[in-house]
Image (spheres, helix red, strand yellow):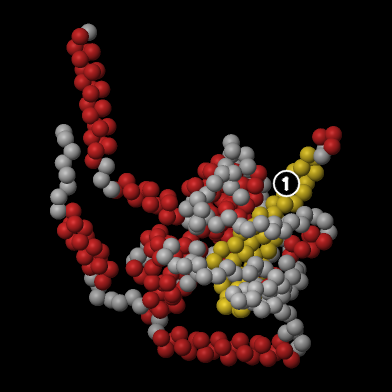
Amino acid sequence: MGYVAVKGGTTAIEESLKRIQYERIKQNTVLEVKTIEGGMRGLIDQVMSESSLYSESLAALAIKQAEGNPEEAVFLLRAYRSTLPRMHYSRTVHSEEMRVERRISASFKDIPGGQILGSSNDYSHRLLDFDLIEETEKAISDWLKAFELEDEDDRDASSSDGNNDIDLGRLPKVLDYLRNEGLITDCPTDPSEPDDVTRKSLTFPASRSQKLQILTRGQTGTVTSLGYAVIRGYGMVHPTVGELRVGQMPIYIDNPLSPSEDGEDAYYIGEIKVTEVEMLVPVTVEKEKGREELELEFGYGLCYGQNETKAIAMSILDKSLERGDKSIPTQNEEFVLYHIDSVESTGFISHLKMPHYVTFQSKLNDVRKTRQDQLEETEEE
């Protein structure tokens, strides 16, 4: 069977695009971008993280266009990101300056500044709330007014009791206390310019900056699954969250006319919401004369928005990849880093839907020839 050219393709594609539009609006309902931005916080944070583009409004637009499909939304947002000029580089961001909204430690009960539960589903009942079906704008407005009044009363009470002296923008890091005791090592500062995987292809062996970029851009479900695989027995004993933070990080850029090393003339351009995790990992180290000792190491995770599960899994994979035993899949950097990217993985899987007529016919001819050869051999016998 010879190759037959497909005709009428342009018309068929145009009709397919019309059908997409029809499926999106056939219920005659307009889903406003601001509605998505206001009510789909978790999905927006996920899309921003996997896209490496911090813009809640653009993420909401991509989600609307993709009809809620996060993989397609990430594809759209990354494509848009590739068209943007890079005007400035921000100064180094220090997470100690995070304006904390949520901060917990699973390693210590009492931490300086206290445990701050913040906003989380961890403490809620996982039951469907059928009242949301009948939720109205008036009910929302009334609830918000009551909440704001209650919050204001709580702040006044804290101020009068003298308990309002905690600076949420300068909370000490939990792991610093372990460093002060010499229980974990300091991280040396690397003054070299980090690699940028959005501008230069990933190379192996990968640098730490490449690994962290790929991990934070990775597909949330895949990063979580591989992190789960690590602690199920593929190379790591049970880790513990030293500290998890969610909050706003201030971003500064140097004065383009007169940049200074100390950043004295830097411009504050805004904040980004991030989730940061420092994960404590016990490891057994062999000392002199075969003696073994238990030591603490840590992995690091950080991603856009409130995306705690992904940040935790990222910190686990960060430490796992550092060990680099290629016989263990979750320590093999090529296996992990090549397969967690959302656009790369879904793009390759989706390409299987595209025409493969010529290659398949070649395979089919091989199968037919093999069958014919076998049949002739049988007849000769």
Residue drawn 62% across and 64% down? 276
Most foreground residue, 343 or 102:
343
In terms of image quadrants, where is residue 264?
bottom right
Q: Is residue 241 visible?
A: no
Rendering coords of residue 63 (x, y %): 39, 68
In the figure, 161 relative to 93: above or below?
below
Query: What residue does disc 1 label?
Result: 283
Most foreground residue, 200 or 258:
258
Quadrant where the image shows the C terminus: top left
Most foreground residue, 13 or 64:
13
Residue drawn 19% across and 57% down? 10
Residue drawn 42% across and 50% down? 345
Q: Is residue 141 left or right of residue 229?
A: left
Name which residue type carries label 1: Val
Mark 1 falls on what kind of element? Answer: strand
Q: Residues within 10 Å of mark 1 (few under 14, many from 20)?
A: some
In the figure, 372 relative to 82: above or below?
above
